[in-house]
C-alpha cells in the first residue's frame, strides 16, 4: 500500500493542484496496490488511480466542509479502479454481454497507414458509408476494400466532411492536434455572491441538484459518480437523438432520465425552470453546440449566478479540431496512443496493427476528473460564493497521459481480481451485473464499497423535474 505519510503520488499531486486543491491534503490519499491491473505501455494505471484518488479526496473535502470536521484519509483500492475503468465490459444484462463496438468501428488499412472509424450509432454508420460512396447495407469487407486504396488523411477528411467519424492513426510522438497546448483542466470563477453553505449530510453531495446533458461514457461517468455521492442527477436527452441503451445501463446508476426537446418553446421553458433550481450543469457536447439553447457558460451564469458549469468535449476548446465529433478510441488514434500501444511482433502482429489502451481510459479518467472539479467547485461555493466554469477534454487527458505522467515502479500487492468489485441488482432493464464504484470513503464510514441508491431505468421515462 502507498502510505499517506509517504511522498505524494506525482500524478495525484498534479491533478489535485490543477483542480485548485490544497497540496497539504495530498497526504490524505493512500492506495492499496494490486499486481496486473490495467497493463499497458503507457502509465494508464497511474492515470486511473490518480483520477479516482483526487475525486475521492474532493468528496472527502466537501463532506468535511459540510460537517465542520477535518478532512479524513481515503484509501483507494487499485483493484476497484481497474474494474471500474472497464465497467462497460463487466456489464451483463440478464446474462447478456453488450457489444461495445459495432462491426464497422475499428482499425482499417489505408493506402499509407491506418485509420480508425467509429460507427456505433446508426447515424454515424450511415454517414461513414455515404461519405465513402458505399451502400447502406455494406459490411466490413466492403468497407475494408473501400479504404485500402485511399490515403489515411484523405479518408479522414472525406468522412469528416460527410458528417462521419474516422481519423488517421498518428505515429508515436506525432499528433493531429497540438497536445502541448491542451491543459488538463481549465477553471475560472465567475461573478460574486454570498457563500452558499450546504447543511451537514451523510453523503458529500446530498441535496445537490445536477442537470446532466452528457452522453456515451466520460460525462455519464462523472454524473454517475455525483449520483453515488448523493446528488439528485437528472439526465436530459433529446427525443430525436438516439443513445445506446447498453451504455446507459452501465452509466445510468443513481440517475433519473428525461426526454426534452430544447428547441421547442415548452422544452425551453422546462429547461429554464430546471436551471433555476440547479446547483450543477454538466455538458458533454462539442464547443458551442448547446449555446443556442441558452447554455453558453457566461450567459448561463449571468442568469443563474452560483451555478457550477462543467463542460467536456473530445478535441479541446480551441483549434481546428475543436468543433469535430470525437470519441475515446478516435482520440487514442489521432494522438499517437494507438501506435504506442501496438502489439509486439512476437504477438504475430508484424503488420503494425495499432493497439489500444486496456480501458477507455481517456473517457473514464476525464469523467472522474470532471466529478472532482464539480466537488471542488461546490466546496469553493460553500466558502466564498460565486459560480464556477470548468472545461476538460479527452485530448487534454491524452496529453497528460503522453507527456505528464511518469511511470511509477510497480510491485507487490495481490494479483488483480475483479470479482470483489462486481455486484448484481434487479432493475427495470433486467438483472444487472455491474462494476462497483472505486470512489473511496473514509474507513468505517460505509460498509463495503458505496453503492448507488437506485439502478438505471429506461431512457427518457422520468418527468423533467427535481425530486
Image: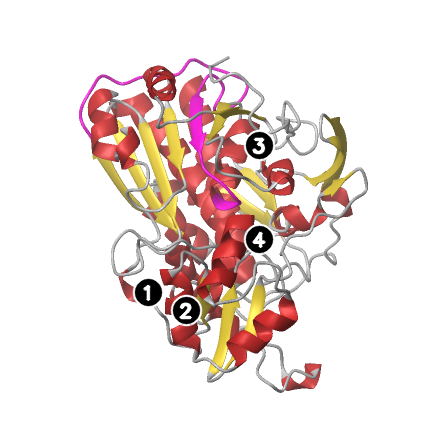
Regarding residue 130, the answer to whether it shows in the image is: yes
Q: Is residue 52 magenta?
A: no
Mark sitting earlier along the chain (4/2): 4
Whether 2 is drawn above or below 301: the answer is below
Asked if the residue under mark 4 is in contact with the one under mark 3, i.e. CB atoms within 8 Å, the reply is no
SS for tag 2?
Answer: helix
Other residues around mark 3 within 10 Å, as few (<14) / some (14–19) / many (≥20): some
Mark sitting earlier along the chain (3/4): 4
State the image quarter where residue 228 is shown: top right
Q: Write down the residue under mark 1.
A: 179
Res. 442 mark? 3
Other residues around mark 4 within 10 Å, as few (<14) / some (14–19) / many (≥20): some
Label 1 vs label 3, nearer the camera: 1
Q: Write down the residue under mark 2.
A: 156
Regarding residue 354, the answer to whether it shows in the image is: no
Q: Write down the residue under mark 4.
A: 120
State the image quarter where residue 157 is shown: bottom left
Asked if the residue under mark 2 is in contact with the one under mark 4, i.e. CB atoms within 8 Å, the reply is no
Amino acid at each position: 500500500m502507498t502510505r499517506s505519510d509517504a511522498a505524494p503520488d506525482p500524478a495525484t499531486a498534479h491533478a489535485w493542484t490543477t483542480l485548485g486543491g490544497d497540496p497539504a491534503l495530498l497526504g490524505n490519499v493512500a492506495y492499496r496496490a494490486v499486481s496486473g491491473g490495467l497493463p499497458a505501455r503507457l502509465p494508464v494505471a497511474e492515470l486511473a488511480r490518480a483520477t479516482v484518488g483526487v475525486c475521492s479526496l474532493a468528496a472527502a473535502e466537501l463532506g468535511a466542509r459540510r460537517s465542520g470536521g477535518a478532512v479524513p484519509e481515503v484509501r483507494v483500492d487499485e483493484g476497484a479502479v481497474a474494474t471500474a475503468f472497464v465497467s462497460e465490459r463487466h456489464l451483463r444484462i440478464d446474462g447478456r454481454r453488450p457489444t461495445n463496438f459495432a462491426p464497422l468501428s475499428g482499425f482499417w488499412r489505408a493506402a499509407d497507414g491506418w485509420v480508425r472509424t467509429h460507427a456505433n450509432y446508426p447515424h454515424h454508420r450511415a454517414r461513414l458509408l455515404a461519405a465513402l460512396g458505399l451502400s447502406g447495407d455494406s459490411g466490413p469487407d466492403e468497407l475494408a476494400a473501400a479504404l485500402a486504396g485511399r490515403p489515411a488523411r484523405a479518408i479522414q477528411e472525406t468522412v469528416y466532411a460527410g458528417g462521419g467519424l474516422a481519423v488517421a492513426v498518428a505515429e508515436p510522438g506525432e499528433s493531429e492536434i497540438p497536445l502541448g497546448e491542451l491543459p488538463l483542466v481549465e477553471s475560472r470563477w465567475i461573478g460574486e455572491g454570498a457563500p452558499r453553505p450546504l447543511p451537514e449530510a451523510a453523503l458529500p453531495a446530498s441535496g445537490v441538484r445536477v442537470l446532466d446533458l452528457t452522453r456515451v461514457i466520460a460525462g455519464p461517468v462523472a454524473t454517475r459518480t455525483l449520483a453515488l455521492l448523493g446528488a439528485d442527477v437528472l439526465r436530459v436527452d433529446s427525443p430525436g437523438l438516439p443513445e445506446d441503451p447498453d451504455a446507459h445501463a452501465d452509466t445510468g446508476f443513481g440517475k433519473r432520465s428525461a426526454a426534452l426537446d430544447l428547441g421547442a418553446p415548452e422544452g425551453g421553458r422546462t429547461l429554464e425552470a430546471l436551471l433555476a433550481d440547479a446547483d450543477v450543469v454538466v455538458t458533454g457536447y462539442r464547443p458551442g453546440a448547446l449555446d443556442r439553447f441558452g447554455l453558453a457558460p457566461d450567459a448561463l451564469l449571468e442568469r443563474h449566478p452560483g451555478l457550477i458549469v462543467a463542460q467536456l468535449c473530445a478535441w479541446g476548446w480551441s483549434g481546428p479540431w475543436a468543433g469535430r465529433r470525437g470519441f475515446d478510441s478516435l482520440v487514442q488514434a489521432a494522438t499517437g496512443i494507438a501506435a504506442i500501444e501496438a502489439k509486439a511482433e512476437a504477438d504475430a502482429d508484424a503488420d503494425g496493427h495499432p493497439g489500444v489502451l486496456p480501458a477507455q481510459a481517456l473517457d473514464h479518467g476525464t469523467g472522474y476528473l470532471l466529478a472532482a472539479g464539480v466537488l471542488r467547485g461546490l466546496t469553493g461555493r460553500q466558502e466564498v460564493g460565486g459560480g464556477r466554469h470548468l472545461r476538460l477534454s479527452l485530448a487534454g487527458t491524452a496529453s497528460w497521459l503522453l507527456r505528464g505522467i511518469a511511470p511509477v515502479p510497480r510491485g507487490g500487492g495481490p494479483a488483480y481480481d475483479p470479482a470483489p468489485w462486481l455486484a448484481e441488482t434487479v432493475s427495470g432493464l433486467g438483472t444487472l451485473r455491474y462494476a462497483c464504484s472505486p470512489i473511496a470513503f473514509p474507513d468505517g464510514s460505509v460498509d463495503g464499497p458505496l453503492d448507488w441508491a437506485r439502478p438505471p431505468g429506461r431512457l427518457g421515462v422520468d418527468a423533467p423535474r427535481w425530486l
